[in-house]
Image (spheres, rainbow, N blue to C red):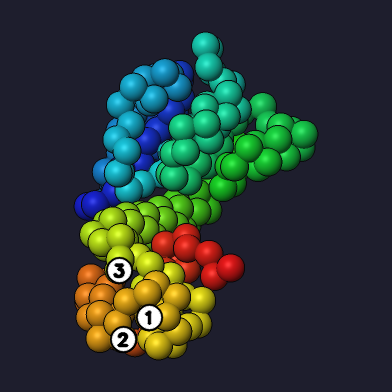
Amino acid sequence: MTGEDAVIHIVDDDRAAREGLGFLLSSLGLRTVSHGSAADLLATLMPDEIGCILADVRMPGMTGLELLEELERRGCPLPVIMITGHGDVPMAVRAMRLGAMDFFEKPVNGMALVDRIREALELSRTRAGAEREKAQLARRVASLTSREVEVAQGVLRGLQNKQIAHELGISLKTVEVHRHNAMEKMGATSAADLVRLLVAAGWSTG
């Protein structure tokens, strides 16, 4: 289990708790960063980071549940695991509804927590990969000319080249050129592949 590309943020106002978790995770080759408050975490989070957040529920200032709300508002993709010394069922339910991946009570079962962290890091990598693909698709779409967009929209609607040419008032040869260019820019190998990519980019088939 390695975490060279991931950061585990430990958020707890209890220094001993932070150091204990940090020691456990570091001994497994994981990189950790400790924060004494939710505000400290929010001030240092990087937008494209891969990792997860371990946050205590009861902290002075912003609580762990309030932190969850703020992370949701910011669209932070990092999975969050909540830890508390005074947990109860309603609190756990609220934490999960706010997007927490899991809820542990102190004293924490170290190996159970490590297993959950492993899952959180995999989820973070999956989310990061999906965001990269989404951004790449957006760049490809942005590279299309206005005419290439019109032709691609025709392909998306299931029209043949001849129908697209008639609808746009251009020659069949011109449609073929723009369709070829659109497919090349989008990285599509076929009309079906182009449609798949356009739908993934948020285009409507209607």
Say which residue label 2 marks: 172
Q: Secondary structure at mark 2?
A: helix
Name which of mark 2 and mark 3 comes first in the sequence.
3
Q: Residues within 10 Å of mark 1 (few under 14, many from 20)?
A: some
| Horizontal relation, residue 68 to residue 134: left or right | right
Residue at the spot x=52%, y=42% of the render? 81
- Which image quadrant: the C terminus? bottom right
Which numbered circle lies on residue 165? 1
| Horizontal relation, residue 155 to residue 157: left or right | left
| Amino acid on which disc 3 is placed | Glu
| Horizontal relation, residue 116 to residue 3: left or right | right
Asked if the residue under mark 2 is in contact with the one under mark 1, i.e. CB atoms within 8 Å, the reply is: yes
Q: Secondary structure at mark 1?
A: helix
Depth check: give the residue in front, 121 or 157: 157
Q: Secondary structure at mark 3?
A: helix
| Residue extending furthest toward the front | 169
Q: Name the image quarter holding residue 127.
A: bottom left
Q: Is residue 56 visible?
A: no
- Which image quadrant: the N terminus? bottom left
Q: Nearer the viewer, mark 2 or mark 3?
A: 2
When the figure is inspected, residue 4 is found, relative to residue 57, above or below; the finding is below
Residue 23 coordinates in the image, percent (x, y): 32, 38
Residue at the spot x=47%, y=38% of the render? 75
Which numbered circle lies on residue 148? 3
| Amino acid on which disc 2 is placed | Leu
Q: CA distance from mark 1 to mark 2?
A: 5 Å
Q: Is residue 72 visible?
A: yes
Q: Residues within 10 Å of mark 2 (few under 14, many from 20)?
A: some
Residue 135 coordinates in the image, percent (x, y): 32, 55
Depth check: give the residue in front, 74 or 143: 143
